[in-house]
Structure formats: C-alpha cells, structure tokens
Image (tube, rainbow, N blue to C red):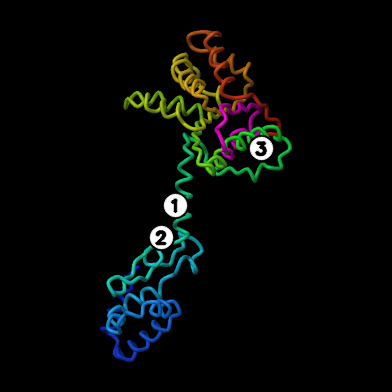
Amino acid sequence: MKPIQSSLKSWMKTNENFKENYVKIKQEVLNDPEISEFLTLHPQLTQAEINKSLIKLYEYKTQVKQCDQCGSYRACKNMIPGYSPVLHVENDEIRLSYEKCHSRVMYEKDQEKQKLIQSLYMPKEILQASFSDIANDETRITAIAELLDFLDQAKTDLPRKGVYFYGQFGVGKTYLLGALANELKKFNISSTLIYMPEFVREIKGSFKDDSVNEKIDYFKKADVLMLDDIGAELQSAWFRDEILGSVLQYRMMERLPVFFTSNYDLDQLEVQLATTKSGVETVKAGRIIERIKQVSKEVKIEGHNRRL
C-alpha cells in the first residue's frame, strides 16, 4: 500500500485547486470528532503546530481505529496491518505512532497457543479436532468421560496417567487425541502427537545427523505425550527396548502422562511387541506393557467404522 503521506503530498503538488482543496481537507480533519477531542485535551498546541502536523492528523483520520471496520487481523485495512494509529503530544509537538490492534493481539495469542501442539505426521483434520464434535457421541461416552476427567484434573495439576485407547479401525481413537490436545492448549499445556509408524522411521533417519538423542529427549519431556497407532509399526528389538522403553521409563519415573491409541488391547499388544526378527522375546515385551500400565489406563472404544 502506498504511504498516505506520499499520496497526499503528490496530490497537493499536482492539483490545480490546491488552496481550495487544502482548506477543505483541513476543515474535514479538524472537524473529525476524535481529532477535535484530541486538540481540546491539548490546548497548549499552537496553530502553527497544528498546521505543520496536518498530514499526521489526516493519516490518523483515514486509518481504522482498533478494528472498528476490520473483520479480522487478516482483513486489516490499515497501512501497517494489525496496527492502529495513536495520537499523542511530546514536547508540545503532535506525534503519531502505531500500536497493535485487538485483532492482532488475539491472533498472536492464538498462534502462541497453537505452538503448544507439536505433531509428527498427524493429519490436519486431527490437529483441528474439537470436543464440540464428539460431546454427544454415546458410542464413545466412556472414553470421552475419561478425557473430561483428565482435563478437569489438569486445571490444577497434570495427572500422572493418560489413557490407552484401543478398538477397531475407524472408531475415532486418534480424533479424541486431537480434541484433547486442543483443549489442553487452553490451559497452556503442551502436547506432542506422534504417529508411531512414522516415528520409527524418523528415529532411524536421525542417525544421519546425530539427532537421535535430542529427539528422544524431547519426547521424554513433553508435558503430554500421545502415541498414535502403537503396534502398527514394524517391530525391532532395538526400537522397542532402546527407544520406546527409554521414553516410557523416563515418563513413568517423572510421573508424566502418556496417551495411546491401538487396534490391540494390552494382551494383544504384548504379543506384537514380543515378536521381532530376533525371535519371540516375551520378557522384554512384558516390561514395555508394565510401563504402559504405569503411565496410562486401558479403555476400550466401541462404535462403527467412521471412515466408511
């Protein structure tokens, strides 16, 4: 957008009826209710100062004040999007500055809250999930009640246990995690959502840049960790023991909650975790299951396949 001061100066130079129009614009500016009130509050301002600052006053008059004509920050009409003009006096001179408008302040707050949700390969629809879409779902009433109880406790102190949701394909397990994450950000509680099959690939790929330990440390310390579709990833003894086991052990010791989704109940998951390329390792798989029980409670989700 072309600066107002430049536009006005150009107009003054080229307009044949400069004096006539100057007087007209000056009158319009000085008759503006807000400017008139401003000048009344500062009787020390001389006529010479007012005349010298006419362009500033004109700029103030033509800008939107605190979103009174804008639908949102993105639709801001001002010269500096998201900023509203402010007139003040300094050393008996009129000054014009800009401050963040209401819409920009709210936009920045929303952006900061959105940063509280970190995800690894989660669909956009999950990151936009809302409790309002599931509140009256009787098929998932037990699961929803568990989440509401968790949220109620989180207002004062983060519970040490999350929930292990299991059920058939498409019953909405992952959507519940997204809705929970969006509710938690209202309390400034961060969430990390991880799609397990991609998590395995991400960790393996991290050997190339030596970032494995850094990433594992991040997942260990997240306020609320959410592991989606556990049991669907290709199992390896190394990932099960060194990565998953390490993360769960840390969170168990630090009393940090973990949420899971899976197509398997815990007994079935134990079989999945035990079966690797190295053979069947029941004891090591059992250790993982015990850690899962320490950081979450098992809840079955019923219902029809919502993907059909």
> Would residue 62 be counted in the magenta stretch?
no
Establish if 224 lies above or below 244.
below
Is tag 3's residue or tag 1's residue first in the polypeptide sequence? 1
Left or right: residue 20 compared with residue 147: left
- Secondary structure of residue under mark 1: helix
Kind of residue at badge 2: Lys
Q: Residues within 10 Å of mark 2 (few under 14, many from 20)?
A: some
Of all residues, the one furthest to the left in this rendering is: 13
Tag 2 and tag 3, C-beta contact below 8 Å = no
- Residue range of the region highlighted in magenta in the rendering: 156-180
Disc 1/disc 2 C-alpha distance (Å): 10 Å
Say if the magenta span includes residue 160. yes
Is 173 positioned to the left or the right of 108 in the image?
right
Q: Mark on residue 100?
A: 2
Residue under numbered circle 1: 108
User: Do labels 1 and 2 touch, CB within 8 Å?
Assistant: yes
The x and y percentages for residue 99 are 38, 62
Q: CA distance from mark 3 to mark 1?
A: 35 Å
N-term mark: 2 or 3 = 2
Q: Quadrant of residue 172?
A: top right
185 vs 201, left or right, is: right
Q: Quadrant of residue 50?
A: bottom left
Picture residue at 42% right of the left edge, 84% below the top: 31
Q: Is residue 57 above or below residue 223?
A: below
Q: Which x, y percent locates residue 57?
A: 35, 77
Query: SS for tag 2?
Result: strand
User: Looking at the picture, how far across and down is residue 220, in whole percent?
Assistant: 45, 26
Which quadrant holds the C terminus? Answer: top right
Locate the N terminus by quadrant. Answer: bottom left
Q: Which numbered tag is attached to residue 306?
A: 3
Q: Residue placed at 56% from the left, 20% from the top?
A: 292
Query: For the residue marked with disc 3, what is the amino acid?
Result: Arg
